[in-house]
Structures are given as C-alpha cells and as structure tokens.
Amino acid sequence: MVGEPKSEAELKKLFPAPRSIDPCLCGSRKRAGQCCLKETGQLVKSPSETKPPAGPTKLVTEKCYAGELNDCDGDSPTKEHYISAAVLELMGDKIDLGGAPWKKDDGPLSISALTSRILCKRHNNVLSGLDSEAARLFNALIGFHKGQTKGRTLFSGEDIERWMLKTLAGIVASGTAARGGERVKANPSREYLEILFGEKTMPLEWGLHYFDYLPSEERPKSQLRIRPEIREDHGRIIGVTIAMVGCQLRLNMGRITNLTDRAVIHRPRALVLADEALLELSWQDSTKTTGVVLSKSPPP
Ligand SMILES: [Zn+2]
Ligand SMILES: [Zn+2]
C-alpha cells in the first residue's frame, strides 16, 4: 500500500547515511566516499553506460532490433533471455506473461521458453548493468517479504527504468506481445532505441511510475507478471506494467494521461519497507522527494 510519506528527518533517523569510509550502498564494493556519497551528504548513483564503446561501427546485424542505430558487431545474434536471466532466476522458474498469443491456457510460462535471437552481442552486452540493477531490486523485494531485507540500499532509478524498457523491447521484438489476440512483432522505435542505448535520456515526464499493490483478485500465481501495453487503435507500444511480488511498476513511454484511482507516484525517491529497509532510488534529476511506504504484505 502507499502509506504516508515519511519526513526526511524520520528517514534519516531510521536509516542513517553511510560515512565516507563505509562500504557504499549501491553494490559496488567501493567505499561510499569514493562512490555515490556526495559532499552534500546525498547519495547519487550514476546510471550505467549503455552506449556501446568506440562506436558507431556502421554495421547492422540482421535480426538485431537495435540495427537502426548502425552500431552492431555484424555477427549473428546469440540466443538470449530477453527478460534478464538473473531476474527470472530470482522469481523461480515460472513467470506470468499474460495474453501471450500462442499459449493455449493462461498458466505461467517456464523461463527456458523465453529466449530469442533479437540483439547482437555488442548491443546485448552493454545492457548487462541494467539486468544486475533490476535483479538487486527484486532480490530486495523478495527478501522483504521473507523478513530478510534490512537497512538502506541504493539503486539507480534510471537503470530500473531502462531495464523495463529493455524487457518491453524484448517482448515486442521477439513476437511475444499480443494485441486483440494477435501476435505483435515489431522493432522498438528509433526514439526508444536511443533512450535504451544511452544516446538520449528519458523525457522527464515519462518513465517509471509506482502503482499500488495489485488487488487480491488480480494477484498472479507467479512472482513476476509482465503486461506490455500496446494501443489497440494504432498499435503504438506505450509501455509495460511489471508486477513483482504483487508490487506494480509501470513504465510509461509518454506522459501518463489516464490516471486510475489507485495511487500513482512518478519516479519515487524510495521504497520504504515498513520500518525495516529503505530502497533508495537515485535520479539524476534529484528534485523528487516522494517516497512510497510498503507494508509487509499486500492489503487483503
Ligand atoms: Zn556507490
Ligand atoms: Zn546490434
């Protein structure tokens, strides 16, 4: 549930910032003072670099969905999980990809089914930082429900956001998405590719939105549920909703216009897990001050 945002002072008391010589909270294994801790006392995690090095190669790999950027390695694409294997492993081996058009029933999918040749190695490799950031976040959320996640950790909001974009791109490029019962197979637009591969930043009003926990009747059997959102009328790919352990995050590739009555927070600054843990999301535009308080279990 979305609770009352805690005040800055309350959060500081519950989850004090690391000292300069302490290990950083971002998973880098560096000292905080040499990593994300700024002189102002703020923690800021830089987004990972997703622009392939020393490009453009002016090569296009056939079947690489980022081919339009003319920066492929030219080799044939390798078979990859298009939803990060590291994330899928945390979720157990089943995932709910509702509406997958070739499926006869509505049951969960096994993760080994979710591979496709859709990116060249060069483009695939630069996205690995996004995968590990998403895996860290999901690990913390799963751990919270088991009573194992404690204290303060730091994540790059932009990396989580672009991981969602990568997931959306993979689902659409591999033909896993559906619209009106028909399979949709499409390349992400040039603009989406430029955002994913570090040539552009996500426009400020787009991006990650936190939604409330799923209502119990909609809660999936598997821990991860992914719903690409494709406009019925003209097929534009507009976003994806990813529910993990019942907690819903939505990536909006555009300004959100039809807010539902459920609480929605754009680019939350933190997920506060009861009084036990603070999952801090760092944004380069640090004007955001809204946190989201999650209770231990989803509301009934
Ligand atoms: Zn750090
Ligand atoms: Zn490529």
Image: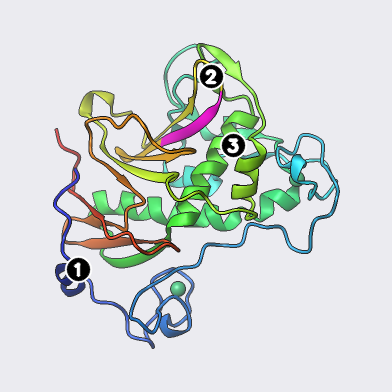
* Residue 18 placement (x, y as % from top left): 32, 80
Identify residue type, mark 2: Ala
What quarter of the picture does the N terminus occupy?
A: top left
Q: Is mark 2 within 8 Å of ligand 2?
A: no
Q: Is residue 296 above or below residue 233?
A: below
**Is residue 247 something one can see in this rendering?**
yes
Residue occupying image coordinates x 22% and y 71%: 15
Label 2 Cα crowd, 10 Å radius (few <14 / some 14-19 / many 20+): many
218 to 179, vertically: above or below: below
Could you say whether the residue bearing mark 2 is in a helix, strand or loop?
A: strand
Q: Residue sitting at 57 percent across and 31 percent down?
A: 171
Identify the secondary structure beneath mark 3: helix
What is the quadrant of residue 245 in the picture? Answer: top left
Return the residue at label 1.
8
Going by the numbered disc 3, the residue's amino acid type is Ala
Q: Which mark is residue 169?
A: 3
Using the numbered discs, state the Cα–Cα distance from disc 3 to disc 1 in whole angstroms: 37 Å
> Under tag 1, what secondary structure?
helix
Q: Earlier in the sequence, mark 3 or mark 1?
A: 1
The magenta-colored residue range is: 236-241
Relative to 210, is 182 above or below? above
Q: Is residue 215 left or right of residue 98?
A: left
At 32% from the left edge and 51% from the top edge, which residue is drawn? 141
Residue position for label 2: 178
- The amino acid sitting under disc 1 is Glu
Which of the 4 image quarters holds residue 65? Answer: top right
Was residue 229 drawn as part of the magenta stretch in this picture?
A: no
